[in-house]
């Protein structure tokens, strides 16, 4: 028997077939699951860790706990700063636990591994704490956002701020894995373009216990600038060691941190940190919007937020807004919405998502205050200069991201 459709009947079938897929894929599994994958016990735990989890939970609560009428769940895990553990957890989350988005990903080596797997299975990752510029350069992904900062912005901003005189010499002390290597490499490139020179460099293992030999090597090189390309406890211990050996007195050499967390600045104290410059993506005391969030976070966590913890909150809110606007948690739809949005919140200023996955936002050149300038426990730094996002990040013309269409 042959069936034929005419007029309204055919139109009705066409409309039904068009709408059915969209209606069917609103919220997968009837729940939106967000995974916080971070360092809970290691050297980055103060700046990410439990604070990252609390920031995401705050965002979910502030959003109302549901999106499109479906519950939002938050899961978390400690990747122990090991790429294989991070990648294994991501595979389990995506395949078994049906996690829709992973956030934080402090430790660039872990972030690279997780981002690669997320691309294979078409799930969203928002990297707020992993900083290697490779994440939005040669390893870029249509499902990944490098949200808060990258090594290019941190190191290039510091070099441009300090390498005012041609021929200025720099010495680098860097942590020996993807993140530290990228910080040093990006800084070297910027220094070369400005006519500076490298007096020397040395690398140390993650979570090193003794920095005296590295400080002596830097002291013997007699550089104009000593750049610490390490983070968290490694940064703090190296900075303490420089002061113990008398480096940085009267600004000779000028000391700059290429990755400085607020928690670590507080930990070393202004007596040690004073005068050190660094580039940051957030400071709690920037204006009333940043202060309002930061005070609530302080009440929840007992410490002011690091830039990555502030980014964890902001990224979660913006991800949920994209789901709400698109009417689905489908990764392609969410990423399309994020790329079409102009962002402005307490963390994102003059911000938009570039096609390589790099969130373009303002960055800030900061200087650690003198003890006499501080008005309180968390009054640790002052703004020297706003670096517009267009100037802070690697130009697309120099990008190796395969997603970029070049003429």
Image (cartoon, rainbow, N blue to C red):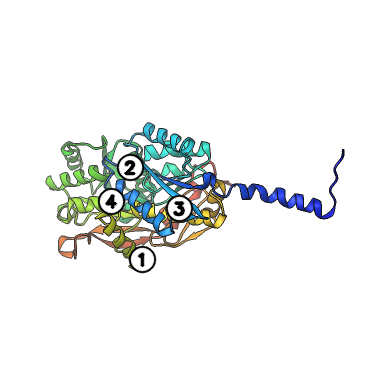
Callout 1: SS = helix
State the residue at coordinates (84%, 48%): 5
Rounded to the nearest whole Å, what is the CA distance between mark 1 and mark 2? 33 Å
Label 1 vs 4, first from the N-terminus: 4
Task: Describe residue 315's horizontal placement relative to residue 272 as left or right.
Answer: right
What quarter of the picture does the N terminus occupy?
top right
- Residue 266, horizontal then vertical, whole percent: 21, 54
Rounded to the nearest whole Å, what is the CA distance between mark 4 and mark 3? 20 Å
Q: Residues within 10 Å of mark 1 (few under 14, many from 20)?
A: few
Residue behind mark 1: 289
Label 3 vs 2, first from the N-terminus: 2
Residue behind mark 2: 184
Q: Is residue 258 visible?
A: no
Rounded to the nearest whole Å, what is the CA distance between mark 2 and mark 4? 18 Å
Callout 4: SS = loop
Residue behind mark 3: 359
Label 3 vs 1, first from the N-terminus: 1
- Nearer-the-camera pick, 217 or 267: 267
Q: Residues within 10 Å of mark 3 (few under 14, many from 20)?
A: many
Q: Quadrant of residue 212?
A: top left
Q: Mark 1 or 2, which is nearer the eye?
A: 1
- Nearer-the-camera pick, 70 or 200: 70
Callout 2: SS = helix
Callout 3: SS = strand
Q: Are marks 3 and 1 in contact (CB under 8 Å)?
A: no
Task: Describe residue 129's horizontal placement relative to residue 406 as left or right.
Answer: left
Residue behind mark 4: 261
Judge whether 388 appears above or below 175 on screen.
below
Label 1 vs 2, first from the N-terminus: 2
């Amino acid at each position: 028997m042959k069936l034929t459709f005419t007029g309204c009947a055919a139109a009705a079938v066409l409309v039904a077939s068009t709408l059915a897929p969209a209606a069917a894929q609103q919220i997968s599994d009837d729940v939106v699951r967000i995974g916080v994958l971070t360092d809970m016990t290691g050297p980055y735990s103060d700046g990410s860790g439990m604070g990252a989890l609390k920031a995401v939970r705050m965002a979910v609560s502030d959003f109302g706990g549901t999106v499109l009428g479906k519950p939002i769940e938050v899961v978390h895990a400690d990747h122990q700063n090991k790429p294989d553990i991070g990648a294994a957890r991501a595979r389990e989350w995506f395949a078994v636990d049906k996690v829709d988005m992973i956030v934080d990903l402090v430790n660039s080596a872990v972030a690279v591994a997780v981002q690669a797997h997320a691309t294979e299975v078409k799930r969203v990752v928002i990297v707020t704490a992993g900083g290697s510029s490779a994440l939005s350069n040669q390893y870029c992904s249509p499902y990944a956002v490098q949200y808060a900062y990258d090594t290019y912005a941190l190191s290039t901003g510091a070099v441009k701020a300090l390498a005012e005189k041609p021929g200025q010499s720099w010495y680098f002390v860097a942590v020996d894995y993807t993140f530290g290597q990228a910080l040093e490499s990006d800084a070297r490139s910027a220094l070369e373009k400005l006519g500076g020179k490298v007096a020397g460099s040395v690398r140390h293992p993650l979570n090193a216990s003794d920095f005296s030999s590295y400080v002596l090597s830097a002291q013997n090189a007699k550089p104009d600038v000593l750049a610490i390309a390490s983070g968290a406890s490694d940064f703090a211990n190296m900075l303490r060691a420089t002061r113990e050996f008398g480096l940085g007195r009267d600004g000779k050499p000028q000391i700059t941190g290429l990755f400085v967390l607020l928690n670590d600045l507080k930990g070393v104290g202004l007596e040690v940190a004073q005068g050190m410059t660094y580039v940051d993506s957030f400071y709690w005391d920037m204006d009333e919007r940043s202060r309002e969030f930061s005070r609530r976070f302080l009440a929840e966590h007992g410490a002011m937020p690091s830039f990555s913890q502030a980014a964890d909150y902001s990224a979660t809110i913006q991800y949920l807004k994209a789901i709400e606007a698109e009417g689905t948690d489908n990764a392609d739809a969410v990423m399309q919405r994020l790329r079409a949005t102009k962002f402005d919140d307490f963390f994102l200023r003059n911000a938009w998502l570039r096609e390589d996955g790099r969130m373009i936002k303002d960055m800030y050149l900061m200087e650690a205050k003198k003890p006499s300038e501080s008005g309180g426990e968390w009054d640790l730094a002052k703004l020297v200069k706003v670096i517009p996002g267009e100037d802070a990040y690697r130009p697309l013309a120099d990008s190796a991201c395969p997603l970029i269409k070049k003429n």
